[in-house]
Image: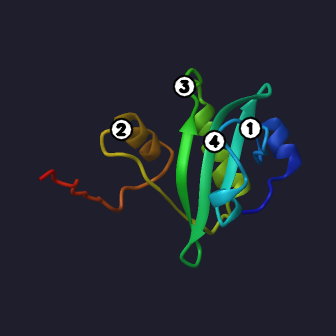
């Protein structure tokens, strides 16, 4: 990932920053200190969205988590944050893979609307009792 141009960040809402130890629920230690990168998107000093990614394969990124804070949804923050990820933060030639739970229709719709195409379906078998 490359840092975005400062003028682009200041003119685009929400702004983004790398998290630090003062952010509740986010710590750079542990799995974040490995290959994961966390990005917080802010508007008026309030976190409105977050993204957690790591590289995989040769020229691809796995967007492990993309989250818009409840109460901040349906206001355009998610679209602005994804646009910043695509245009300013992730390398332009990167393949980006993101997942969503199959029952989360809003997340599935949002991902399609911002340019992701469905490419894989996963199944699971839960443990049986007895």
Work out whether residue 11 or residue 44 is closer to the camera in this orientation and state it.
44
Q: Which residue is mark 2?
A: 104
Residue extending furthest toward the bottom: 58
Residue extending furthest toward the right: 6
Q: In the image, what residue occupies the spot 59% across and 74% down?
A: 59
Question: Percent position (x, y) of residue 33?
Answer: 71, 61
Is residue 14 visible in the rendered image? The answer is: no
**Nearer-N-terminus badge (1/4):** 1
Tell me: residue 58, above or below residue 84. below
Q: CA distance from mark 4 to mark 2?
A: 18 Å
**Nearer-N-terminus badge (3/4):** 4
Assess whether mark 2 and mark 4 are in contact (beta carbons under 8 angstroms): no
Mark closer to the observer (1, 2): 1
Q: CA distance from mark 3 to mark 1?
A: 17 Å
Residue extending furthest toward the top: 71
Residue density around tag 1, few if under 14, some if 14–19, many if 20 or more, within 10 Å = few
Q: Which mark is residue 70?
A: 3
Q: In the image, what residue occupies the spot 84% across and 38% down?
A: 10
Q: SS at mark 1?
A: loop
Work out whether residue 2 or residue 47 is closer to the camera in this orientation and state it.
47
Q: Which residue is mark 1?
A: 23
Apparent side of residue 98 relative to residue 33 in the rendered image (left or right)? left
> Which image quarter: residue 73?
top right
Q: SS at mark 4?
A: strand
Q: In the image, what residue occupies the spot 41% across and 47% down?
A: 100
Tell me: residue 69, above or below residue 117. above
Q: CA distance from mark 3 to mark 4?
A: 12 Å
Q: Which residue is mark 4?
A: 50
Residue density around tag 3, few if under 14, some if 14–19, many if 20 or more, within 10 Å = few
Residue density around tag 4, few if under 14, some if 14–19, many if 20 or more, within 10 Å = many
Q: CA distance from mark 1 to mark 2?
A: 26 Å
């Amino acid at each position: 990932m490359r840092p975005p141009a400062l003028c682009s960040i200041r003119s685009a809402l929400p702004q983004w920053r790398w998290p630090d130890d003062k952010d509740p629920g986010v710590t750079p230690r542990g799995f974040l200190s490995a290959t994961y990168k966390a990005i917080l998107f802010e508007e008026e000093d309030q976190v409105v969205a977050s993204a957690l990614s790591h590289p995989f394969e040769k020229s691809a990124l796995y967007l492990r988590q993309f989250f818009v804070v409840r109460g901040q949804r349906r206001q355009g923050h998610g679209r602005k944050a994804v646009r910043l990820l695509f245009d300013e933060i992730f390398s332009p030639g990167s393949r980006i893979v993101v997942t969503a739970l199959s029952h989360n229709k809003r997340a599935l719709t949002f991902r399609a609307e911002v340019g992701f195409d469905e490419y894989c379906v996963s199944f699971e078998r839960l443990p049986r009792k007895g």
